[in-house]
Amino acid sequence: NPLASAQYVLAAHLPRQLPADGGREVAFAGRSNAGKSSALNAMTGQNKLARTSKTPGRTQQLVYFGVQPDRWLVDLPGYGYAKVPPDLREHWKTFINGYFRERQALAGLVVVMDIRHPLREFDQQMLAYAAARGLPAHCLLTKADKLSRGAQGTTLLQVRREVHAEYGEATSVQLFSAPSRIGVDELRGVVAGWLEL
Ligand code: GDP
């Protein structure tokens, strides 16, 4: 597993706190509770890399995990918390907008979505940011274990068709489940490829 060496390095809530913009990084986005922390943990094979229960105020940061010198995984703030105060929400929007527009190191975006609620508004916004930059994006349909095999396949095809139409062929989609170990190797392959590991 090329991502097993990932370790926490820093959390940034201001652009100037980010590491020097010279390496390669893959960002992970998702609505709160979609399963992003569980996916990061399964992908790296580390049960405690990303915390799996968080409170709103603590989540407004970009968390950097170093894999190798100048190779990073970036955990973006979970979006969709109703309780985040408006000024904080504005701050995060500005920060994330700037990050997506300017970050040269950004090699790809993983959008984590609960397979039962794919492509909500914020997911679409993230995919649009990536498409606007010409960055590849990869959608994880997580908690696949919550659906039957048949329903998993149907949703996969539907979401794939929709993202190809909306955001282009550089947007890929896969099934994922942390407890059932569905799609773990596939995710590792995509992320390691983007990081050129
Ligand atoms: P995050 O807020 O996106 O980081 O989500 P977490 O990883 O903390 O997961 C939120 C909740 O969903 C937790 O109770 C997890 O145990 C659960 N969960 C995450 N991934 C899966 C999955 O693949 N299958 C199932 N059944 N539950 C999951």
Image (cartoon, rainbow, N blue to C red):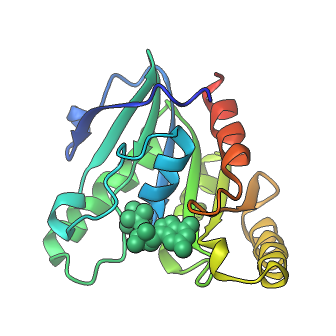
Task: Out of 92 and 81, give the one closest to the viewer.
Answer: 81
Name the quadrant containing residue 177. Answer: bottom right
Q: Quadrant of ligand 1?
A: bottom left
The image quadrant where one finds the C terminus is: top right
Residue under the point 64% across and 32% down:
192
* 73 sits to left or right of 173: left
Q: Position of residue 162 (x, y in %)?
A: 77, 75
Name the quadrant containing residue 150. Answer: bottom right
Task: Out of 16 and 78, give the one closest to the viewer.
Answer: 78
Task: Out of 140 and 26, give the one closest to the viewer.
Answer: 140
- Viewer can see residue 148: yes
Q: Position of residue 21 (x, y in %)?
A: 40, 25
The image quadrant where one finds the N terminus is: top right
Residue under the point 25% across and 51% down:
61
Q: Give the vertical position of 5 relative to 172 (above or below).
A: above
Q: Give the vertical position of 166 relative to 154 (above or below).
A: above
Name the quadrant containing residue 131. Answer: bottom right
* 186 sits to left or right of 92: right
Residue under the point 46% across and 57% down:
38
Q: Give the vertical position of 119 relative to 128 (above or below).
A: below
Of all residues, the one furthest to the front in this rendering is 180
Give the number of callouts: 0
Q: Position of residue 186 (x, y in %)?
A: 73, 47
Q: Give the vertical position of 164 relative to 26 (above or below).
A: below
Residue under the point 59% across and 72% down:
143
- Viewer can see residue 125: no
Q: Position of residue 169 (x, y in %)?
A: 82, 56
Of all residues, the one furthest to the top in this rendering is 69
